[in-house]
Amino acid sequence: MTPTHHLDASTLLAYAAGTLDEAFTVVAASHIALCPACRGAVRAAEGLGGELFDRMADTAISAGCRARTMAALDQAGLHRLPVPGPKPELPVPLARLLPSQRLDEIGWKRKAPGVAIFDVKLPTGAKGQLKLLRIGAGRAMPEHGHGGEEITLVLKGAYRDHLGRFGAGDVADLDEEIEHQPVVEADGDCICLVATERPTRFKSFAARLMQPFVGI
């Protein structure tokens, strides 16, 4: 698996700084676990942050600022990469949040023909929504935009849209200006991990009508 679509530079910097919302942190960490290029970018960003801290060593800071910084560092470590070991079926940052380590055993909820969702539970107070989305082979999602930031990681299968082909390990790091219509390839279901800031903006009336029932 060699990903060809990567996290945006701003997302990588926010991840390295520990300032991403929790839902986005899980998706970013899961992609980074699969992507050597993004792992290298995160290490470079963390190294730069370390140099900046060294230069600020003699600068006085308040107790409140120090406490907030340490809390952010603790949060940043929640989904960091695991130590080397046997390769799991799922990225460890995601696997630790699921009731089963196998995607076919997590308790999918069928929302529409060819569409199933699993809501990934985050700690109380966490920001953003995190879902696993399974779309049947050959099916197309309704054309849509996004109410805010959205990061989608492909775990299994592949889809295509005007941005290209997204296969296992690839990530679509999108903002509210992007509109697209993913179409799953015909040789199997596509399973994605999706973090969203706000609900999806579907263009068709029928899709908007079904949105409360589908839950995306």
Image (spheres, rainbow, N blue to C red):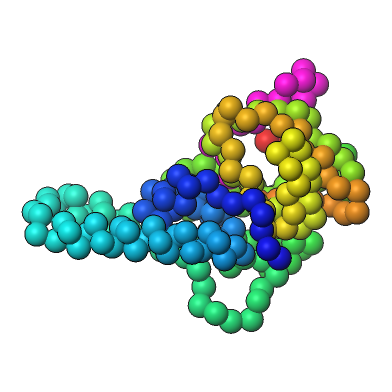
Q: Residue at x 52, y 42 (%)?
A: 128
Residue under the point 66% across and 58% down: 3
Residue 56: x and y in percent read 16, 56
How many numbered marks are there?
A: 0
The front one of 42 and 216 is 42
Horizontal and vertical percent position of residue 107: 75, 56
Looking at the rendering, the stretch of residues picked out in magenta corresponds to 195-208
5 vs 189, left or right, is left
Q: Write the residue at 45% across / 60% down.
A: 42
Instruction: Place residue 141 in its image quadrant.
Output: top right
Whether residue 89 can be seen here: yes
Q: Quadrant of residue 215?
A: top right
Where residue 60 sits in the image (x, y, percent)? 8, 54
The answer to whether residue 62 is left or right of residue 138 is left
Quadrant occupied by the C terminus: top right
Residue 214 counted in the magenta span: no
Q: Is residue 163 left or right of residue 114?
A: left
Outermost residue to the bottom = 85
In this picture, is 38 found above or below 144? below
Q: Which residue lies at the image location 40% right of the left edge and 61% below the top edge?
A: 44
Residue sitting nearer the eye, 81 or 97: 81
User: Dividing the image into 4 quarters, which one contains the N terminus?
Assistant: bottom right
Q: Could you say which is closer to the camera, residue 155 or residue 110?
A: 155
